[in-house]
């Protein structure tokens, strides 16, 4: 019923009540009663006309889909696609850092650490492509330290409401920041050491993976991918001591693929504000290039809890490399041999101290312990390297968000073993 007809029905009901009142209660004459009857008849005719008009409008609206069926489906899709969800979306993030050693200020350094540009394109409601290209240290050439790299390039297809498959170059689902590594996603100017030296960052592999988002709050990921190449180990370089896996990951650049790796990750978010997760990555890493086979396995446990203004997180990761004794014998005499085990852990607490409009201040503190060479396989007396003491780092600082997606960071870091690394860090970052 059209809303416009409601006042008419009310008037009609009132008029009928007056017209049908007993004769002794009427103060009008018979002629007045006849006039009211004529008025009611006119109102009824008007109501019929409006009802007929409403019915015609409804019939026209019902006929629209039939008429539109002659329009090509591709045209309809363009017309009906919401303006807020375009098929192609641009994204990116940038980090500019300043590091000033407290005991040796002459080594202070400013760096455009990385600039990343990406896009996502949705082919249809179930299929999209995700890509990112990264430039490090502002300038990339044969004579500069900069690097240009593809960070992600994969296709994802949603074949079930809860399940999707990805194929291409993707970030390995491990830890808290490898898949979420934008400067606005973590605390501190520099990414923490455990998720840099133990878990390489940003670590990507080429392969295929299954991703499930379950209604119970679980996110499950697993698949097969390229892995590490131990043949790349350089005993004369310090790169292996800084990050064992960072020195031998391949980034899908002419990657050796005789031996493939397997990975799995599970993250639970079924309780508001709580994340609990674990992951594992394992695979052979010599690709039949050496007489000895060697398996690399890395796993981690992580948690994050955000009760109220607090943001609390913790992570432990451990890696192992098998048969390192046979692999290290030809490398004896070098500065850096292959460790058989490496591990690290950290705990972190941040607090939203102040918020006004788009301004948000979040001070934080972090303690971390890591050892990139926690154990070596026995090579015999005088040949087995000594295990270095684990490094411990204390970081105190704050993130200041002064616009959505833009953050200024400041922190101080203190190292327990190598105090020459104590420093002040300043950073500016954004992501969109």
Image: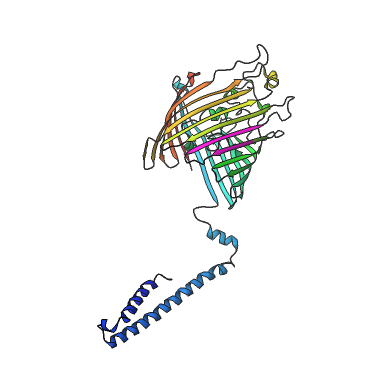
Q: Main secondary structure of the magenta part?
A: strand
Report the side of 6 relative to 323 (left or right).
left
Q: Is residue 200 in sight in this rendering?
A: no
Q: How is the image coloured?
A: rainbow
Q: Is residue 411 above or below residue 274?
A: above
| Residue at the far bottom in the pictured view | 31
User: Residue at image x 45%, y 41%?
Assistant: 405
Q: Which residues are magenta?
A: 263-290
Report the side of 232 relative to 134 (left or right).
right
Report the side of 106 relative to 215 (left or right).
left
Q: Using the image as rendered, state which of residue 69 and residue 256 is in the foreground.
A: 69
Q: Is residue 350 in sight in this rendering?
A: yes
Tell me which corner region of the image, top left, top right, bottom left or bottom right, holds residue 385: top right
Q: Position of residue 344 (x, y in %)?
A: 55, 26
Is residue 351 inside the magenta stretch? no
Q: Position of residue 69 (x, y in %)?
A: 59, 67
Q: Is residue 146 above or below residue 338?
A: below
Report the side of 248 relative to 415 (left or right).
right
| Residue at the far left in the pictured view | 27
Q: Position of residue 195 (x, y in %)?
A: 54, 30
Q: Position of residue 131 (x, y in %)?
A: 58, 43
């Amino acid at each position: 019923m059209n809303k416009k007809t409601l006042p008419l029905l009310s008037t009609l009901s009132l008029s009928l009540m007056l017209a049908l009142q007993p004769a002794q209660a009427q103060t009008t004459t018979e002629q007045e009663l006849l006039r009211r009857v004529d008025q009611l008849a006119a109102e009824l005719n008007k109501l019929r006309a409006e009802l007929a008009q409403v019915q015609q409008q409804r019939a026209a609206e019902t006929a629209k889909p039939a008429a539109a069926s002659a329009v090509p489906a591709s045209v309809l899709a363009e017309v009906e696609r919401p303006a807020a969800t375009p098929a192609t979306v641009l994204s990116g993030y940038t980090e500019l850092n300043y590091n000033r050693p407290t005991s040796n200020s002459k080594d202070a350094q400013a760096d455009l650490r990385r600039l990343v540009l990406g896009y996502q394109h949705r082919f249809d409601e179930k299929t999209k492509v995700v890509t990112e290209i990264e430039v490090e240290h502002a300038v990339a050439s044969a004579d500069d330290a900069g690097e240009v790299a593809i960070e992600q390039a994969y296709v994802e297809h949603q074949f079930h409401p809860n399940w999707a498959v990805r194929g291409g170059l993707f970030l390995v689902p491990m830890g808290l920041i490898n898949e979420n590594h934008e400067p606005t996603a973590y605390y501190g100017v520099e990414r923490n050491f455990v998720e840099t030296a133990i878990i390489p960052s940003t670590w990507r592999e080429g392969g295929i993976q299954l991703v499930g988002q379950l209604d119970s709050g679980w996110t499950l990921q697993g698949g097969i991918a390229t892995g590490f190449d131990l043949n790349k180990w350089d005993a004369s370089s310090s790169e292996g001591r800084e990050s064992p896996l960072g020195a031998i990951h391949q980034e899908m650049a002419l990657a050796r693929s005789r031996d493939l790796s397997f990975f799995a990750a599970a993250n639970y978010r079924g309780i508001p504000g709580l994340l609990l997760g674990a992951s594992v990555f394992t695979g052979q890493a010599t690709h039949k290039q050496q007489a000895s086979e060697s398996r690399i396995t890395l796993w981690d446990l992580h948690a994050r809890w955000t009760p109220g203004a607090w943001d609390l997180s913790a992570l432990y990761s451990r890696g192992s490399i098998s048969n390192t004794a046979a692999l290290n014998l030809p490398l004896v005499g070098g500065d850096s041999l292959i460790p058989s085990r490496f591990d690290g852990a950290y705990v972190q607490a941040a607090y939203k101290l102040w918020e006004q409009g788009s301004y948000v201040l979040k001070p934080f503190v972090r303690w971390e312990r890591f050892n990139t060479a926690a154990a070596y396989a026995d090579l015999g007396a005088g040949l087995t390297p000594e295990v270095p003491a684990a490094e411990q780092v204390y970081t105190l600082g704050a993130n200041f968000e002064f616009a959505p997606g833009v953050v200024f960071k400041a922190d101080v870091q203190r190292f327990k073993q190598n105090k020459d690394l104590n420093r002040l860090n300043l950073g500016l970052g954004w992501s969109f």
